[in-house]
Image (spheres, rainbow, N blue to C red):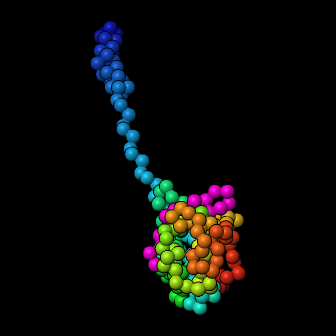
């Protein structure tokens, strides 16, 4: 009788438990799920536009979605030619101006425009100064760039002036004095 129980137990082990254990070992792990790309990052920054009297810069808070592979500096620069949302603020950037690129290194932000920045500019010296500092203050207002200076290029090249009143060959530091609070 004991031999029969032992034989039955051995057979059960051989036919049920051992193959089942082998199947468990042979099962492949489920294929890895493709990872989802990170959600675009929404960030806030302050842009600067002119007032209607061409005396001051008016701050305007913007929220933008920063595309993957770009920085907030690049995304903010792309907003510069757009119209203001703040009442009584005026866009200083000439029509058809495009941002061709923006880089930052060695405490210098370099912003490259197309020729429309200069060719389509129609203001006087006050408007020219406000235009320069709307760009400078917008870019240097971004976290991590406060102590940077800004250099302007047109089609990758230095140029003399936007409107003939202020040298564009300089490197410009942030100017808080012309911001209307």
Residue drawn at (67%, 56%), measured in percent from left and top?
106
Displayed quadrant of residue 53: bottom right
The stretch in magenta equals 95-109
State the quadrant of the C terminus. Answer: bottom right
Q: Is residue 38 left or right of residue 7?
A: right
Counting from the top left corner in percent of width and height, residue 131 is at 58, 78
Quadrant containing the N terminus in the rendered view:
top left
Location of residue 165 with respect to 24 vertically, above or below: below
Q: How many labels does the image show?
A: 0
Q: Residue 126 vs residue 113: left or right? A: right
Q: Does the magenta stretch include residue 58?
A: no
- Residue at 49 percent of width and 55 percent of height: 69
Q: Report the predominant secondary structure element of the magenta stretch.
A: strand
Residue at 60 percent of width and 74 percent of height: 161
- Residue 85 visible to the viewer: yes
| Viewer-side residue, 45 vs 109 | 109
- Examine the image and state in which quarter residue 180 appears: bottom right
Q: Residue furthest top?
A: 3
Q: Which of 138 and 38 is in front in this view?
A: 138
| Percent of width and height locating residue 48 | 58, 78
Front-most of 1 and 97?
97
Does residue 26 sit above or below 52 in this rendering? above
């Amino acid at each position: 009788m004991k031999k029969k129980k032992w034989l039955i137990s051995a057979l059960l082990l051989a036919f049920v438990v051992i193959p089942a254990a082998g199947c468990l070992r042979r099962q492949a792990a489920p294929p890895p799920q493709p990872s989802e790309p990170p959600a675009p990052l929404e960030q806030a920054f302050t842009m600067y536009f002119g007032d209607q009297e061409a005396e001051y810069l008016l701050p305007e808070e913007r929220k933008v979605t920063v595309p993957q592979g770009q920085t907030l500096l690049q995304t903010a620069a792309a907003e510069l030619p757009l119209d203001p949302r703040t009442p009584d603020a005026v866009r200083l950037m000439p029509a058809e101006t495009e941002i061709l690129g923006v880089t930052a290194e060695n405490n210098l932000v370099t912003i490259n425009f197309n020729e429309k920045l200069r060719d389509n500019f129609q203001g006087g010296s006050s408007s020219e100064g406000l235009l320069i500092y709307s760009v400078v203050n917008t870019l240097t207002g971004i976290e991590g760039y406060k102590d940077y200076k800004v250099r302007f290029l047109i089609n990758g090249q230095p140029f003399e002036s936007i409107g003939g009143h202020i040298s564009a060959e300089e490197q410009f530091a942030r100017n808080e004095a012309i911001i209307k609070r």
